[in-house]
Amino acid sequence: MAYVVAAKWRAHPGKADRLLDVIQEMTPPSRAESGCLFYQAQRSEQDPDLFFLYEQYADLAGYEAHMDSEHFTRLVKQEAIPELLADREREFYETIGDDAGGLSS
């Protein structure tokens, strides 16, 4: 089973393009983390201030390592949260089945 994070980030008015830059800078090193199985960000077509991040980690420890990483600390904790994000929601899941993508029968 994988540890899944589904996050919605809403940019402050006028800050969405900078938040997009932050997400684009964060994606390659996040994907390279040893505990990261999948990392993909999306931007709403209807609301360009709204972003959705879908992440899968091998386990909770992989996610915790992500949150403690240099790039997460610098880009999210030090810039995005205080300056760019008007709202941030996170939900946590575990995949169902024997592998990260399948359902057991």
Image (cartoon, rainbow, N blue to C red):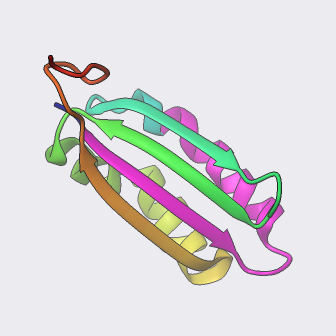
The part of the image, by quadrant, that contains residue 72 is bottom left
Above or below residue 58? Residue 6 is below
Q: Position of residue 34 (x, y in %)?
A: 28, 28
Viewer-proximal residue among 21 and 99: 99
Q: Which residues are magenta?
A: 3-29
| 92 lies left or right of 71 | left
Residue lying at 23% horizontally and 22% vertically, measured from the top left: 103
Q: Position of residue 83 (x, y in %)?
A: 65, 80
Viewer-proximal residue among 101 and 34: 101
Residue lying at 45% horizontally and 31% vertically, measured from the top left: 31
Residue lying at 56% horizontally and 82% vertically, measured from the top left: 82
The extreme right residue here reads 14
Viewer-proximal residue among 101 and 82: 101
Q: Is residue 25 magenta?
A: yes
Above or below residue 44? Residue 82 is below
| 55 lies left or right of 1 | right
User: Count of labels shown?
Assistant: 0
The part of the image, by quadrant, that contains residue 97 is top left
Residue lying at 47% horizontally and 58% vertically, measured from the top left: 7
Q: Looking at the figure, which quarter contains the C terminus?
A: top left
Q: Position of residue 51 (x, y in %)?
A: 65, 57
Above or below residue 67? Residue 86 is below
| 38 lies left or right of 98 | right
Q: Looking at the figure, which quarter contains the N terminus?
A: top left
The part of the image, by quadrant, that contains residue 75 is bottom right
| 80 lies left or right of 6 | right
The extreme front residue here reads 105
